[in-house]
Amino acid sequence: MNNHQNAIFHQITNFLKTPLALLGVDLKNFQFNKICHFANHPYLCKGLFMLFIETFFITFS
């Protein structure tokens, strides 16, 4: 994983900490980036990005 992907997963983990802490789930030993193997395939990331862009432009046009 590159630094950009690690930063994204770090943000996702931080975002999930509060609601999961309320549910009693501990993320201290949770490795989110090991579960998301799709992040190592750039064509999937490109497809997700294009889907996001298309959705954004359809929503706001």
Image (tube, rainbow, N blue to C red):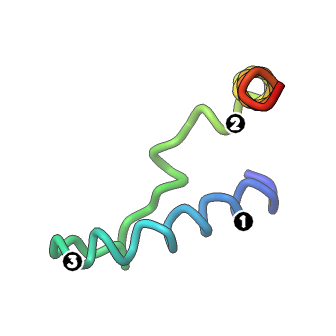
Q: Secondary structure at mark 1?
A: helix
Q: Please, what is the three-letter code of the amino acid marked with disc 2?
A: Asn
Q: Horizontal and vertical percent for residue 39?
A: 66, 38
Q: Is residue 47 left or right of residue 22?
A: right
Q: Secondary structure at mark 3?
A: helix
Asked whether the beta carbons under mark 2 and mark 1 sit within 8 Å of each other, the answer is no
Residue drawn at the location 52% of the way across and 42% of the way down: 36
Numbered circle sitting on residue 61: none
Please name the residue that numbered disc 2 is placed on. 40
- Which callout, 3 or 1, points to the residue nearer the camera? 3
Dot 3, crowdedness within 10 Å: few (<14), some or many (≥20)?
few
Name the N-terminal-most of marks 3 and 1.
1
Please name the residue that numbered disc 1 is placed on. 7
Q: In which quadrant will I find the C terminus?
A: top right
Q: Please, what is the three-letter code of the amino acid marked with disc 3?
A: Leu
Q: To which quarter of the image does residue 41 belong? A: top right
Q: Please, what is the three-letter code of the amino acid marked with disc 1?
A: Ala
Q: Horizontal and vertical percent for residue 30?
A: 37, 66
The span from disc 3 to disc 1 (Cα, nearest Å) is 24 Å
Please name the residue that numbered disc 3 is placed on. 22
Residue drawn at the location 68% of the way across and 59% of the way down: 8
- Which callout, 2 or 3, points to the residue nearer the camera? 3
Residue drawn at the location 21% of the way across and 71% of the way down: 25
- Which callout, 2 or 1, points to the residue nearer the camera? 1
Dot 1, crowdedness within 10 Å: few (<14), some or many (≥20)?
few
